[in-house]
Image: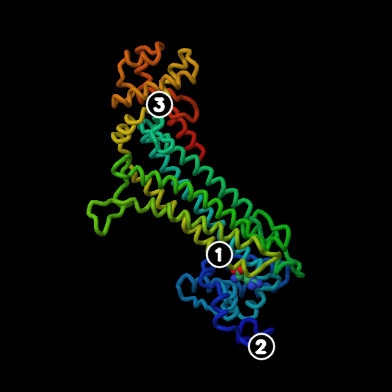
């Protein structure tokens, strides 16, 4: 009577096409550790509550230990006939230990089982991502520290705007990365509740101890409502939303790296081990890694949209639709992990080219705002100062020079308030040092910001 899985109710085996269509073992087998961990906690609870005998628990533990060994050795045979990771492991357990294996599923459903497995899996993934984010941030801070005083043009509209230091620019990404870490930690906090005990959807008739299982598995508590416990995938969506934002930040950084590496710009070098060549053009050194990260951002965004769309039409409680949650989730987690690991390493291989940054700074009237501020401090209303400097810039452009190259006499034609002390204001270093407040680009502020960021991480 047990020739196929649902033999009790069914009069013919499942069609091969349906079997392939409904099976998830190819992708959910990667949750095998979490599945076994959850099963062992459940079995311990069943024994503690005298729902199964102590001997059954011993058999289950022995069988599971062997299954772990078989999977680790690559000897475990995963079968499509057994649909998913849960049934594959349960079936093997029964083959190994007999009736105790058949008792494991008492008071449990694959619905609360799979919800538990995914939460455990994602919790591990988040912990790894938080570690990688810390490393990524640490390397960004090291680079920012080395470049705390290196002037580069800050841009708006991709046009030279005002001088900043390269270190200050990098610290913007430190801020984004801290917010990313906060979002993943927040997602972890909310997902860390136990679904087991919900069984199929309504709870179970056995005298279970859910708090005991929760404590065994490191959950902070249990899911309060059995219907919600089996059907909620908010945590997967939250994870992908955090992942999409993180990738958005990586993608913006990538866009800048591509620009900075362009020979016409030449702001940075990236170590050769992170670059690729061309199969035809011998001169090429291409920023493939940042470009690919920019591309993979679309893929992670796709995972988020997949999951949102997956959930939007589902009535309570469990529906098989939910099996489709895993591939996008796994893919998003894998992509974020790989991207962070490679970026952390690559940042350590970035070096600035200060001479090119300075050359670019001398071609966009980067200290024009400083001149306007200078006049304002001498009493001219800011709007009038803005206009006077606009005229000065126009004149400098006609002459093909930068503002500091205009003579004092020339400058004074735009405002009699200008005197010899203007030239200190018009230098890049003067401009940087003057922005001397929290969040500003003065090198001393950049160093202080780095110290605060290090203390936070
Ligand atoms: N493989 C299934 C999933 O990923 C496990 C739960 C199946 N439950 C069910 N009633 N069909 O969602």
Mark 3 close to ligand 1, CB under 8 Å: no
CA separation, marks 1 and 2? 31 Å
Q: Crowding near pointer 2: few (<14 within 10 Å), some, many (20+)? A: few
Residue 145, percent across and down? 39, 35
Sequence-first tag of 2 and 3: 2
Q: In the image, 11: left or right of 333? A: right
Residue 240, percent across and down? 55, 55
Q: Which of 408 and 241 is in front in this view?
A: 408
Q: Nearer the viewer, residue 255 or 241?
A: 255
Q: In which quarter of the image is residue 146?
A: top left
Q: Residue 11 — which label? A: 2
Tag 1 residue: 326
Q: What element carries label 2?
A: loop
The residue depicted at 49 percent of the width and 34 percent of the height is 452
Q: Which residue lies furthest to the left in this view?
A: 282
Tag 3 residue: 432
Instruction: Judge whether 175 appears above or below 299 on screen.
Output: above
Q: In which quarter of the image is residue 40?
A: bottom right
Mark 1 close to ligand 1, CB under 8 Å: yes
């Amino acid at each position: 009577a047990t020739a196929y899985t649902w033999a009790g109710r069914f009069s013919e085996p499942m069609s091969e096409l349906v079997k392939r269509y409904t099976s998830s073992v190819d992708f959910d087998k990667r949750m095998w550790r979490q599945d076994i961990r959850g099963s062992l906690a459940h079995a311990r609870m069943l024994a503690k509550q005298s729902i199964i005998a102590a001997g059954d628990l011993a058999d289950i533990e022995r069988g599971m230990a062997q299954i772990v060994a078989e999977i680790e050795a690559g000897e475990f045979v995963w079968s499509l006939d057994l649909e998913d990771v849960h049934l594959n492991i349960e079936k093997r357990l029964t083959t190994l230990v007999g009736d105790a294996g058949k008792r494991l599923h008492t008071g449990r459903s694959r619905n609360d089982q799979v919800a538990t497995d995914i939460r455990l899996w994602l919790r591990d993934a988040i912990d790894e991502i938080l570690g990688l984010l810390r490393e990524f941030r640490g390397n960004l801070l090291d680079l920012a520290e080395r470049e705390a005083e290196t002037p580069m043009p800050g841009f708006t509209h991709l046009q030279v705007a005002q001088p900043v230091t390269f270190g200050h620019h990098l610290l913007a990404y430190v801020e984004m990365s801290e917010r990313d870490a906060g979002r993943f930690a927040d997602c972890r906090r909310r997902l860390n509740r136990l679904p087991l005990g919900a069984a199929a959807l309504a709870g179970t008739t056995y005298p279970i101890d859910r708090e005991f299982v929760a404590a065994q598995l490191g959950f902070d508590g249990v899911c309060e409502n059995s219907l919600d416990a089996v059907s909620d995938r908010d945590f997967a969506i939250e994870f992908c939303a955090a992942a999409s934002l993180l990738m958005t930040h990586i993608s913006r950084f990538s866009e800048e790296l591509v620009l900075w590496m362009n020979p016409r710009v030449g702001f940075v070098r990236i170590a050769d081990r992170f670059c690729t060549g061309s199969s035809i053009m011998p001169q090429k050194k291409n920023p493939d890694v940042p470009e690919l990260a920019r591309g993979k951002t679309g893929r992670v965004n796709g995972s988020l949209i997949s999951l949102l769309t997956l959930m939007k039409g589902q009535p309570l409680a469990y529906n098989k639709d939910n099996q489709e949650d895993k591939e996008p989730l796994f893919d998003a987690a894998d992509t974020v992990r790989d991207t962070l690991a490679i970026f952390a390493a690559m940042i350590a291989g970035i070096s600035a080219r200060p001479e090119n940054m300075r050359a670019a700074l001398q071609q966009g009237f980067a200290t024009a705002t400083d001149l306007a501020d200078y006049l304002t401090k001498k009493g001219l209303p800011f709007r009038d100062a803005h206009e006077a400097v606009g005229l000065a810039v126009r004149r400098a452009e006609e002459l093909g020079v930068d503002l500091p190259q205009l003579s004092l006499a020339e400058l004074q034609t735009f405002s009699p308030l200008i005197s010899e002390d203007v030239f200190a204001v018009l230098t890049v270093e003067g401009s940087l040092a003057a922005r001397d407040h929290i969040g500003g680009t003065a090198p001393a502020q950049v160093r202080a910001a780095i110290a605060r960021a290090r203390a936070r991480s």
